[in-house]
Image (cartoon, rainbow, N blue to C red):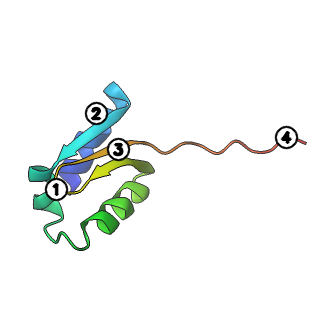
Amino acid sequence: MKKLARIIATDLNKNGHSAVYLSEMARVWPDTKTRLKEIVQFAESHHWRLRYYKHGFVAIFDKAPTTISSRK
């Protein structure tokens, strides 16, 4: 999982997004019933966002948007 996180971080710094395909997802998250929930938790733990997910095909990550504090 650490290796995948490094790959995603590199892609995000270079391209602003990172695509992870099924073969890579299945190695880290083998259980298809819990995969989506685990991917979302993984993304959030790294301050990323799961931008798009197609079951059995791809997960696309990007950097989580920062919140803008309200002005007074």
Choose mark 1 or mark 2, whichever is in front. 1
Q: Count the numbered circles shown.
A: 4
Specify whether 52 is left or right of 32: right
Q: Circle 1 sits on which residue?
A: 56
Q: Residue at x 26, y 72 (%)?
A: 34
Q: Which mark is residue 61?
A: 3
Amino acid at circle 2: Asp
Q: Which element carries disc 3, helix, strand or loop?
A: strand
Q: Is residue 18 above or below residue 50?
A: above
Q: Give coordinates of residue 54: x percent, y percent.
A: 26, 51
Q: Residue at x 10, y 60 (%)?
A: 27
Whether residues under marks 4 and 1 lie with C-beta atoms below 8 angstroms apart, the answer is no
Amino acid at circle 1: Gly
Q: Which mark is residue 69?
A: none
Q: Give coordinates of residue 3: x percent, y percent.
A: 18, 49
Choose mark 1 or mark 3, whichever is in front. 1
Amino acid at circle 4: Arg
Q: Is residue 2 above or below residue 38?
A: above
Along the viewing direction, whichever of 68 and 6 lies nearer the viewer? 68
Q: Give coordinates of residue 71: x percent, y percent.
A: 85, 40
Specify whether 51 is left or right of 11: right
Spatial separation of the CA atoms under disc 4 and disc 2: 34 Å
Q: Which element carries disc 4, helix, strand or loop?
A: loop
**Image quarter of residue 37:** bottom left
Marks 4 and 2, the one that precedes in the sequence: 2
Whether residues under marks 3 and 2 lie with C-beta atoms below 8 angstroms apart, the answer is yes
Q: Residue at x 54, y 42 (%)?
A: 65
Q: Which mark is residue 71?
A: 4
Spatial separation of the CA atoms under disc 4 and disc 3: 30 Å
- Report crowding for label 1: few under 14, some 14 to 19, many 20 or more residues within 10 A (C-alpha): few
Marks 3 and 2, the one that precedes in the sequence: 2
